[in-house]
Amino acid sequence: MPAEDTVFYVLYDKFMFWSILVAIFTFGWLFTAILRYRDGVEPDTTNIDHIEVGAFPVDRHNTTLELMFYIVPTFLVVWLTVMALGSNAAVWNYDDTDEKTFDITVNAYQWYFEFVYEESLTWEDTDTGIEVVWDVESKTMQVTADGNPAASSIEIKLGAIESELFFNGTDAKGLPNTEYSPYQHNHVKVYDADGVLLHTWEHIPIGHKLITPSNPMIIPCDEVIIANMHSKPVDASDTRNVGVQHAFWVPEWAMKEDFVPGLEAGTTLGFMPDDAGTFPIRCAEYCGMQHSIMTGEVMVVARAGSDCTFDSGIKKSDSSSANNYDGGEM
């Protein structure tokens, strides 16, 4: 969901159109009046449209024209207001009745974001030539890399247990003793011989937490994301501290919502990402001395079995990349 796909981007275009139209009329009349009725121009007594500088033409004014100067701007302001309110309603009064929703809680601390999953998410990279399939009955996992012969090694994480296996990159690989549990965090990552990540399969269970800046916020594409947002104090034992003001901002989406400290129900942000990829998150509200380091990333992925394209291909040693996080709970 780039910024050009958002209602505010469309609203900007509409406001710009009317602003240019009004500017052409206003400045056109301004320069005409400056040139035609400037001081020093000899009065033309034969011209009924003559206006004397410094004198209001009380005796021969145009009532219709004067009313239009009030009526037209009033209608224009009302119309722009209606458009602005309509855009706000589209963002904050989102329609989730006909769309699949995905709930996630976003907590803001000094100075990081915490993402708590209210629903599980199983996702997998697409168009990599690699596929991960779990067989629940035989308790084995099969990695097929017929379309990507560069595959060399497989990293497996099942809860707290991690292992790495070599892989020739051409045959289907049955891995025994790899029992899949939907209640723990699991991932499978396939690398080439140079340590470049080729493919990721991951299951995030309910209640799992990801924390910035080391972990991105991972959400599925083509679903209405319902983010319940809270400002949290660093020390919850101090009842006087209810947190500080933060703002969740994704610049590329032109999307921002505040975290309001002390608001028990929190605030809610609804949006639907329709483009896979990794996008930066910023805190747009000054929240203390280290406000500038309160950053993160949101990663839009495809659910396993869907076709939302996501491009991975980053170094295993590159700790700053979105696809190379450990996914662990902090």
Image: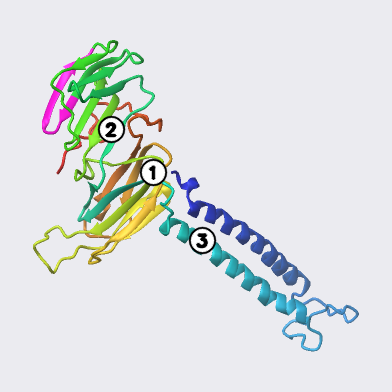
> Residue sitting at 42 percent across and 59 percent down?
93
Labelled pair 3, 2 in contact (Cβ < 8 Å): no
**Magenta region: which residues?**
156-167
| Mark carried by residue 153 | none
Mark 3 or 2, closer to the camera: 3
First in sequence: mark 3 or mark 2?
A: 3
Residue at the far front: name it. Answer: 137
Mark 1, residue position? 223
Amino acid type, mark 1: Glu
Reply above or below: 291 against 25.
above
Mark 1 secondary-structure assignment: loop
Mark 2, residue position? 323
Labelled pair 3, 1 in contact (Cβ < 8 Å): no
Front position in the image: 200 or 175: 175
Reply above or below: 116 against 278.
below
> Residue sitting at 35 percent across and 52 percent down?
249
> Residue sitting at 15 percent across and 42 percent down?
329
